[in-house]
Amino acid sequence: MNITITDRANQALEELNTVENSLLKLKYETEGCGCVVSGVNELWVVTAPDVDDIFIETNGTPILVERSKRVFLDEALTVDYSDVTQMFMLKSPNQILNPRMRLLNKVNVR
């Protein structure tokens, strides 16, 4: 798997993520979606990986991805940022996986 973070997305991450020593996680969220194949991708700020997480190298900050949820992601992904919507976007050469991807601070949230 290859994830590219655009320059604008990197800039937005620096501006929006104020948690020191944090990690970025590409979370395939299924809560409230009905079933596992109806999930939505989100960006999470976390302090430690979960048991199922693996690091994916990018052109910038490495991103955590759930090993068991990789099946729902394309092999080549791009994380971008839209100034119009003020949200992140996850896309591949074949599709847009989430045009309005939120950045959620999951530090100290349980």
Image (spheres, rainbow, N blue to C red):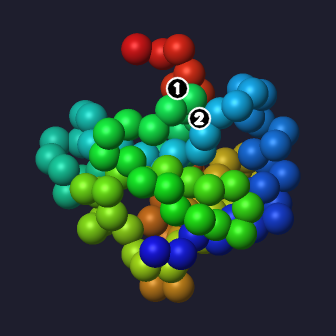
The image quadrant of residue 89 is bottom right
Label 1: few (<14), some (14–19) or many (≥20) C-alpha neighbours in 10 Å: some
The residue furthest left is: 35
Can you say whether 105 is above or below 70 in the image? above
How many numbered callouts? Answer: 2
Q: Residue at x 38, y 37 (%)?
A: 50
Q: Amino acid at mark 2?
A: Val
- Is residue 86 found left or right of 14 in the rendered image? left
Q: Which mark is residue 106?
A: 1
Residue 21, disc: none
Looking at the image, which is closer to me, 32 or 59? 59
Q: Are marks 1 and 2 in contact (CB under 8 Å)?
A: yes
Residue located at (25% from left, 34% from top): 32
Q: Distance between the Cα atoms at labels 1 and 2? A: 6 Å
Vertical side of 49 occupied by 20: above or below: above
Q: Which residue is mark 2?
A: 45
Provide the secondary structure element on which disc 1 rests.
loop
Q: Quadrant of the C terminus?
A: top left
**Residue 93's spot in the image, x, y percent?**
53, 85
Q: Position of residue 109 (x, y in %)?
A: 48, 16
Question: Amino acid under label 1?
Answer: Lys
Q: Counting residues from the N terminus, which is met first, the one under dot 1 or under dot 2? A: 2
> Does residue 81 appear anywhere in the picture?
no
Q: x%, y% of residue 85?
A: 70, 50
